[in-house]
Image (cartoon, rainbow, N blue to C red):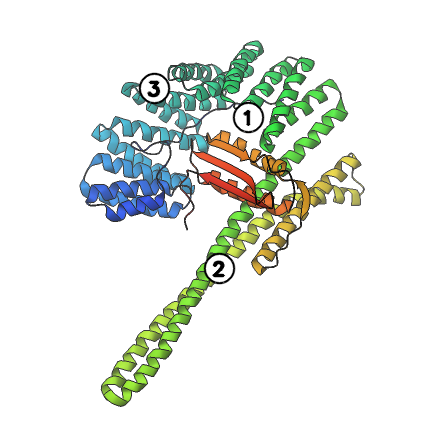
Amino acid sequence: MAIRNACLIFLLLTAVMGAAQKTPVDSLWRGLSRAEGDSAQWFYLVELCAGYYRTNSDSAILLGKKSLEYAEKAEKPLLKTISLNTLGGAFWFKGDQDKALEYYFEALAIAEASGLQQNASTTLGNIGIIYSERGDLENALKYQERSLKLKKELGDSLGMARALTNIGLNQFRAEQWDAALKNYEEALGLARALDEKFGEGLLLGNIGAVLVEKKNYEKARSYFGQALEIRRALGDKSGIANDLNNIGATFQKEGRVDEALPYFHQSLEIARAVGSYSLLTLPYQSLADAYRQKGEYRQAFEYQALLLEAKDSINNQKVIESVAEMEAKYQTEQKEKELAQAELELSRQRSARNRILYGALLAILALSSLVFWARSRARLRKKQAELERAESDKLRELNRIKSNFFANISHEFRTPLTLIKGPLLEMAQGRFQGDYQKYYRIMLRNSERLLRLVNQLLDLSKLEGGRMELHLEQGDAGRFIRAIAHSFESMADRKQIQYNIEVGEGLHTAYFDRDKLEKILSNLLSNAFKFTGEEGRVSLQAKGLENGRRLHLKVQDNGIGIRQ
């Protein structure tokens, strides 16, 4: 049985910026090019630094350091603390927590010395979250409680709710149930006062999870039930599935399995309607445990098998996303290589023209022309050498990317191979004592998984070589597109993104390549969610054109965009 504790950790970036970067980076670059004065340039540099957090951390770090130079030149503590905080966030997204803490502590020292309480409270929250990610709950609580104290002094109700939730999360992890409950309840009061329904539903679920740990199952059901009502009012299907499963788990923990089963089945029905594999794992696990507890092992085994299939599907989706990302990097490097070769060829053509011109001038200008020609040749050789070095560097970088790509793919092969090899080795040595049929199915699933990985690599090779072919099959195009689109709803819920799906009623039976269509649509939606911040918008529109002879797919988002 499983109780999902849907706790919140709010990412705090800088003291003056919003919760997410809204302005496209192209617009910010144009603004920077037109900015007059150090303060205006500093502002655009800070915004650009945050804009590159998720797409190019190295660029974010360079821009953050440049903004820090302007802030130090202006000798304004406010600007410096914001630059240091933003730069700390860049290192955070890069995964360098030590460097992030270094900048955060410097920002905190300046903010406290200058009486900048809002900046200090934000920085304290950032420091606390890093310690929480490291598992250092003692330091995490210390800094988050300091942040909460300042938020209270400033009268920042939303900031207080976030800090209390973060504190409660760490206390929950430390098994300090009473302390976690107290902070969750205080945060719940603030969320209700602010009419934050989404946060209220999450906090009700958090309180229910604490009460389960305290074995107060009846009261926990009451809180899960309140959370369920809010989720239904919001139309939050993933939240509804979680709350139904949590209610069932409280009955199961009391030994009332027959009363738990209807809630687990309702949760499963909604999870299937959503089409999210990650959401399906929760009711599958609960049903497998419940039927095992009842002694109905056949049904328990069936749900355990479905659980393993869902987890395999999640892993396959991660592989597809990884392959798409590597392919994009590879294609970019190929284009840069072609550009370098074109520039080299153009330079060689210009060299040939210059040699003809120098020969004609030699007859007229004699020795002076000869000297001029010799100097030009020297400059040309230097430029050619630079271009050749650049081409060599590009080739080396391309080889490095290919090596990394195949290293990552090799890692994905290791797990299914291990799951196949283990039982086979025991069978070969006569030591196998398990259920043969069960392990045959496990080995079959993992061999099919290996086959899918190999097919993806072959598709990549065909695409690169221009040999890709379509395999058309007749099917319901509208239903197929909806199934893929709904699989991203859990990601939208997790990032609090408004996700709209519009599939035209005219999309019915058609001939299409299922594999290619799934990859195209999955990659488009993956990129949209990847580059869209919290509380953003993503929409999918699919419709038939020319009386159903053509399919039009349109994915839109209000994220930061992909750098061209």
Nearer the observer, disc 2 or disc 3? 2
Q: Is residue 419 toward the left or the right of residue 193 in the image? A: right
Disc 1 residue type? Ser
Q: Is residue 366 visible?
A: no
In the picture of the structure, the residue carrying the numbered disc 2 is 334
Give the x, y percent position of residue 39: 21, 41
Q: Residue at x 19, y 37 (%)?
A: 76
* Residue situated in front as seen by the camera: 315 or 343: 343
In the picture of the structure, the residue carrying the numbered disc 1 is 238
Q: Which quadrant holds residue 462? A: bottom right
* Mark 1 vs 3, N-terminal side: 3
Residue 500 against residue 221 in the figure, above or below: below
Disc 2 residue type? Gln
Residue 14 against residue 201 in the figure, above or below: below
CA distance separating discs 2 and 1: 41 Å
Disc 3 residue type? Ser
Q: Secondary structure at mark 3?
A: helix
Q: Residue at x 78, y 38 (%)?
A: 432
Q: Residue at x 46, y 15 (%)?
A: 181
Q: Secondary structure at mark 2?
A: helix
Nearer the observer, disc 1 or disc 3? 1
Q: Residue lying farthest front?
A: 547
In the picture of the structure, the residue carrying the numbered disc 3 is 157
